[in-house]
């Protein structure tokens, strides 16, 4: 224990640390309070290590040697923004944990112009008086989808809440038991229903619901028939659900609106690009659904938003609901969404310019070329690494097309100096975090979800990750 006591004596005092040259310099760009806090935390943590019997003498001596760097790193961490760019090597295109859809730089440049100035957000320029923030996007949404009217709110969860609270408060809504879904991040149909004041009438069974189940459930108190897209799972085998056309007919006959939460909100026929057919927003409207709601940042490829389209009479009611004010969208979202939607005026443009659609429809030939480029760059710049291009599958993600497997090429990375798990961790902790996938003891980077402009960062990250280990 004598040595341990010596360690305590070797610990510098707070004032002494402050006077160290590099700490003193750091005061130029890090607030004093933050540096002081970091000094106290680091000293305290080393003191704890000294007392603890499990931590070796060498480790503590090493900590004391590096104390100034540790303090500066810690302080920098406290002032650096926490939300930052990462590189998505997972191949999951609409990755909810990694920010779902990307917005192109082209569009953002135009958005900067709008949001860094005053804008006509709620001002009618023609008449010189108050206007509506929703007017800017309603036209374009109606043009693309063929809807009578449209409304945009914070996200699809709030859209469903607004729809139910407007049309079904204290009334009954009929839903199939096969569609009582939970979407990641705790959107559960029964709970959303309860929140919005509607009474859930669940009918049928998990695997089968017939039209007669709906018919039998309709009564005096029925406010709507609700269909929910089972976005993130598929029930296969002995199953039956009621086609939306039949539901629409039933609704018409009984004068009850039909609502559909289609989740992803795809606006183009993806089967043209080799993917499975996913019913579009236009399909639902054409089938006669009264109100359709979907997300802005899933297959649409825009910002987080909930888009409601359908009958004007019903949407007008929603616009007047107090809840609309509480879940309204910001000007930044309106600006981005309008510009993304304008790309849809020409399908080729949408496919080319909207990152989500571009990544989704990228040909295997282009992917192969991309993988080869990354392979060459890594091979040229890093010696101690074993790389290989392998066949694999990308996923759509975001609870869209859950069973879809899109052929892709991945780069497998190995190094004799570092385990697969440690390499994954180091890449994840790189200056610009690189998120990879481990499969069958291979560390994989799917090039589909990576911008070619980031390839140099990846090379730097792999180098850093391997070296970091070797210097330990
Ligand atoms: C994703 C999804 C939601 C939630 O949408 P957010 O925009 O994430 O709020 C609701 N319903 C379905 C069917 C979905 O797929």
Image (cartoon, grey):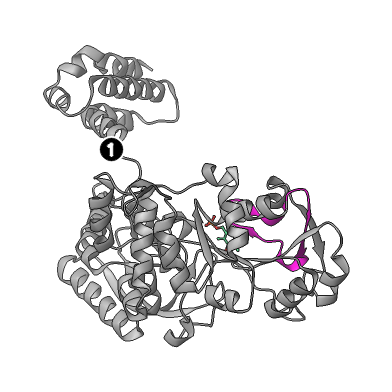
Up-down: is 266 above or below 108?
below
Which residue is rendered at x = 51% and y = 54% of the image?
155
Percent x, y for residue 236?
70, 78
Which residue is rendered at x = 36% and y = 48% of the image?
121
Which residue is rendered at x = 75% and y = 71% of the image?
251
Residue 105 falls in which quadrant of the image? bottom left
User: Residue 267 versus residue 59: which sits nearer the camera?
Assistant: 267
Query: Tag count in the figure?
Result: 1
User: Residue 429 versus residue 102: which sits nearer the camera?
Assistant: 102
Q: Is residue 8 visible?
A: yes
Up-down: is 2 above or below 187?
above
Q: Is residue 445 visible?
A: no
Residue 63 falls in which quadrant of the image? top left
Residue 6 falls in which quadrant of the image? top left
Asked if residue 106 lies left or right of residue 2, the reply is: left
Up-down: is 469 above or below 295?
above
Percent x, y for residue 123?
36, 47
Asked if residue 431 lies left or right of residue 29, the reply is: right
Dot 1: within a 10 Å radius of its alpha carbon, few (fewer than 14), some, or many (20 or more) residues? few
- On whether residue 204 falls in the magenta region, the answer is no
> In what quadrant does ligand 1 lie?
bottom right
- On whether residue 180 falls in the magenta region, the answer is yes
Which residue is rendered at x = 36% and y = 65% of the image?
340
Asked if residue 166 lies left or right of residue 210, the reply is: left
User: Which residue sits furthest front?
Assistant: 127
Say which quadrant the N terminus sits in. top left
Tell whether circle 1 marks a residue whose Cβ is less than 8 angstroms from ligand 1. no
Say which quadrant the C terminus sits in. top left
Asked if residue 129 lies left or right of residue 216, the reply is: left
Residue underneath mark 1: 80
Q: Specify start and end residues of the magenta stretch as a single range.
A: 169-190
């Amino acid at each position: 224990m004598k040595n341990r006591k010596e360690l305590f004596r070797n610990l510098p005092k707070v004032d002494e640390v402050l006077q160290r040259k590099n700490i003193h310099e750091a005061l130029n760009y890090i607030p004093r309070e933050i540096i002081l806090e970091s000094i106290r935390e680091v000293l305290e943590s080393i003191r704890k290590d000294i007392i603890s019997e499990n931590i070796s003498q060498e480790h503590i001596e090493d900590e004391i040697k590096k104390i100034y760097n540790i303090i500066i790193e810690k302080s920098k961490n406290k002032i650096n923004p926490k939300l930052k760019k990462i590189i998505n090597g997972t191949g999951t295109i609409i990755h909810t944990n990694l920010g779902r859809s990307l917005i192109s730089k082209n569009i953002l440049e135009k958005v900067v112009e709008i949001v860094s100035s005053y804008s006509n957000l709620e001002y009618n320029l023609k008449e010189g008086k108050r206007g509506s923030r929703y007017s800017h996007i309603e036209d374009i949404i109606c043009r693309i989808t063929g809807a009578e009217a449209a409304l945009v709110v914070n996200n699809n969860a709030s859209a469903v809440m607004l729809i139910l609270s407007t049309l079904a408060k204290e009334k009954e809504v009929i839903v199939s038991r096969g569609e009582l879904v939970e979407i990641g991040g705790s959107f559960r149909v029964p709970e959303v229903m309860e929140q919005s004041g509607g009474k859930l009438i669940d009918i049928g069974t998990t695997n089968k619901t017939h039209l007669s189940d709906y018919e039998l459930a309709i009564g005096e108190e029925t406010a709507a028939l609700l269909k929910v897209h089972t976005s993130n799972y598929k029930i296969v085998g002995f199953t039956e659900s009621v086609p939306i056309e039949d539901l629409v007919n039933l609704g018409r006959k009984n004068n009850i609106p039909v609502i559909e939460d289609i989740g992803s909100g795809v606006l183009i026929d993806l089967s043209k690009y080799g993917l499975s057919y996913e019913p579009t927003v236009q399909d639902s409207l054409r089938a006669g659904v009264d109100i359709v709601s979907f997300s802005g940042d899933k297959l649409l490829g825009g910002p987080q938003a909930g888009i409601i389209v359908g009958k004007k009479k019903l949407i007008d009611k929603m616009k007047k609901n107090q809840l609309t004010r509480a879940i309204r969208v910001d000007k930044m979202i309106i600006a981005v969404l309008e510009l993304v939607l304008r790309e849809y005026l020409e399908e080729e443009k949408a496919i080319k310019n909207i990152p989500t659609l571009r990544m989704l429809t990228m040909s295997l030939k282009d992917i192969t070329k991309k993988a080869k480029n990354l392979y060459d760059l890594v091979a040229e710049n890093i010696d101690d690494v074993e790389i290989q291009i392998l066949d694999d599958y990308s996923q759509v993600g975001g609870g869209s097309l859950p069973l879809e497997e899109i052929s892709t090429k991945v780069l497998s990375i190995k190094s004799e100096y570092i385990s697969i798990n440690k390499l994954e961790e180091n890449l994840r902790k790189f200056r610009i975090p690189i998120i990879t996938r481990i499969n069958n003891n291979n560390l994989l980077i799917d090039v589909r979800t990576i911008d070619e402009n980031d390839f140099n960062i990846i090379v730097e990250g792999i180098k850093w990750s391997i070296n970091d280990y070797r210097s330990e």
